Image (cartoon, rainbow, N blue to C red):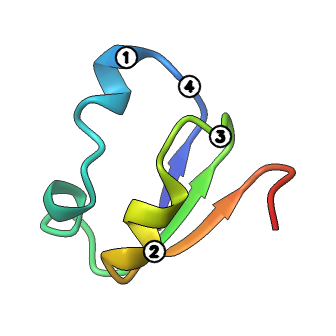
Amino acid sequence: MVIVVTEWDEYRRQMAPELVSTLTEGRIIIDGRNCLDAAAWRAAGWTYYGMGRP
């Protein structure tokens, strides 16, 4: 599981689904700032939760 709580570019640029998949076993991401591309994460096989998003 990955939890994102900042929208800083330094982190957002490094948060590619392909890269993060190599660092964790679970494929659940919680985007607390709605700064990530939900469609890209879902297309990569992740369960994506964004605050205030369906």
Identify the residue under disc 2: 42
Please report contact status of discs 3 and 1: CB closer than 8 Å, yes or no.
Answer: no
Q: Nearer the viewer, residue 2 or 35?
A: 35
Q: Residue at x 45, y 74 (%)?
A: 42
Identify the residue under disc 4: 6
Task: Please name which of the two marks, 2 or 1, marks the residue nearer to the observer.
Answer: 2
Q: Residues within 10 Å of mark 4 (few under 14, many from 20)?
A: some
Q: Residue at x 60, y 34 (%)?
A: 5
Q: Please state which amino acid type lies under the numbered disc 2.
A: Arg
Disc 3/disc 2 C-alpha distance (Å) = 14 Å
- Is 26 drawn above or below residue 4 in the view shown? below
Say left or right for 48 vs 42: right
Q: Residue at x 67, y 64 (%)?
A: 49
| Image location of residue 28, percent across then percent down | 50, 73
Identify the residue under disc 3: 34
The answer to whether residue 27 of the structure is visible from this angle is: no
Task: Please name which of the two marks, 4 or 1, marks the residue nearer to the observer.
Answer: 1
Q: Please state which amino acid type lies under the numbered disc 4.
A: Thr
Task: Please name which of the two marks, 3 or 4, marks the residue nearer to the observer.
Answer: 3
Disc 2/disc 1 C-alpha distance (Å) = 21 Å
Tell me the element at label 4: loop
Say left or right for 43 vs 33: left
Q: Residues within 10 Å of mark 1 (few under 14, many from 20)?
A: few
Q: What is the number of callouts on the image?
A: 4
Tell me the element at label 1: helix
Q: Please state which amino acid type lies under the numbered disc 3.
A: Asn
- Quarter where residue 30 is shown: bottom right
Please report contact status of discs 3 and 4: CB closer than 8 Å, yes or no.
Answer: no
Identify the residue under disc 1: 9
| Image location of residue 33, percent across then percent down | 67, 34
- Quarter where residue 27 is shown: bottom left
Name the N-terminal-most of marks 3 and 1: 1
